[in-house]
Image (spheres, helix red, strand yellow):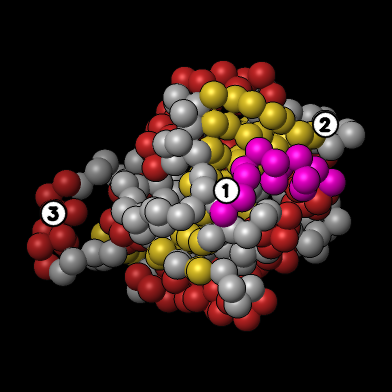
Amino acid sequence: MGTPAFNLHAFRAAQRAAPLSDFARELFAGLSLGARSVSPKFFYDVAGSALFDRICELPEYYPTRTEVRILTDCADEIAAQIGPDAEIVEFGAGSLTKVRLLLDALEAPKRYVPIDISGEHLEAAVERLRADYPRLMVQPVVADYTMPLVLPARDKGAGQRVGFFPGSTLGNFNPDEALAFLQLAHRLLRGGGLLLGVDLVKDPALLHAAYNDAQGVTAAFNLNLLRRANAELDTDFDLDGFTHAAFYNSPMRRIEMHLVSRRAQTVTLDGQRFEFEEGETIHTENSHKFTVEGLRALAVKAGFRPAAVWTDPDHLFSVHWLQAA
């Protein structure tokens, strides 16, 4: 449907002409596919990160408040699993909000290593955290946490090195990617563990409302990816020419987010023209939903030993303690 074949010669010529950013390379490749897509990690520039913070406060968006309730109500049990003098490594740290619940519950945490792809947003959040936790060593890492990482050397006096991965971000990966991330986390956390939050399978009506909020914040978050491309990559997306769409794919147990072309149009990226027909989409995100048993089986496959699991009374969300023996 109006999609050109991938032009490898043009792509390599563009690479030789000037180095492309990761965003440009992945968007170019994604727009060249028959089913167009782009990674959701590129949502999170400064504006996108701020919009996601607003999403987390929406009445329809149950995951954040439900996970916060679990972390609050079960704080003592979670702290008992982690133990004293822990080193906390947070993957995709964002605004460093949920980790405060963990830090407050822990006995004398030694160090906190937040990892995030949005450096400017991370820097501002770290400044606020340091002001509130002056005795805590905070060492931020600006990186894509899905790629091989080098973490600071362990402190000899520290307790367990514990990964923190809340928000059901694991659900943004396809099954192979989720397994690969958990295997990476297991290698990084060996001898410690991972505290992982994942969304559970539930009534599709609740899921639809969570990703199609009445205020349109999720739509703005989705469309911000195109605004970012225009600002950083000199593309010419017409933001009024695309609309947000999110729906539950029941057989795949996932929410899908797309940007739908409202009309036939052309977009240019790095000298290449990409034709869109009316109704053609860019697939921007998946959010897979899990069962408790399915998540535990995946963790075992990655090398973890599943231990405690906590859920809310309505079984909307779950938090898992996975030991990295």
Residue 240 lies within the magenta run: no
Residue 219: image location, x then y, percent: 67, 59
Which mark, by number, is residue 20? Answer: none
Residue 272: image location, x then y, percent: 26, 60
Residue at image mark 2: 315
Nearer the N terminus, badge 3 or badge 2? Answer: 3
Q: Main secondary structure of the magenta part?
A: helix
In the picture, measured across the screen, residue 261 lies left or right of residue 310, that is left
Instruction: Identify the image quadrant of the N terminus.
Output: top left
Mark 3–mark 2 distance (CA, rounded to whole Å): 49 Å
Which mark, by number, is residue 12? Answer: 3
* Pair 3/2: label in front: 2
The answer to whether residue 45 is seen in the rendering is no
The answer to which quarter of the image holds residue 51 is: bottom right
Which mark, by number, is residue 164? Answer: 1
Q: Secondary structure at mark 2?
A: loop
Residue 212: image location, x then y, percent: 75, 51
Mark 1–mark 3 distance (CA, rounded to whole Å): 39 Å
The amino acid sitting under disc 2 is His
Judge whether 208 appears above or below 58 on screen.
above
In the rendered image, the residue lying farthest to the right is 313
* Pair 1/2: label in front: 1
Image: magenta residue range: 73-85
The answer to whether residue 24 is seen in the rendering is yes
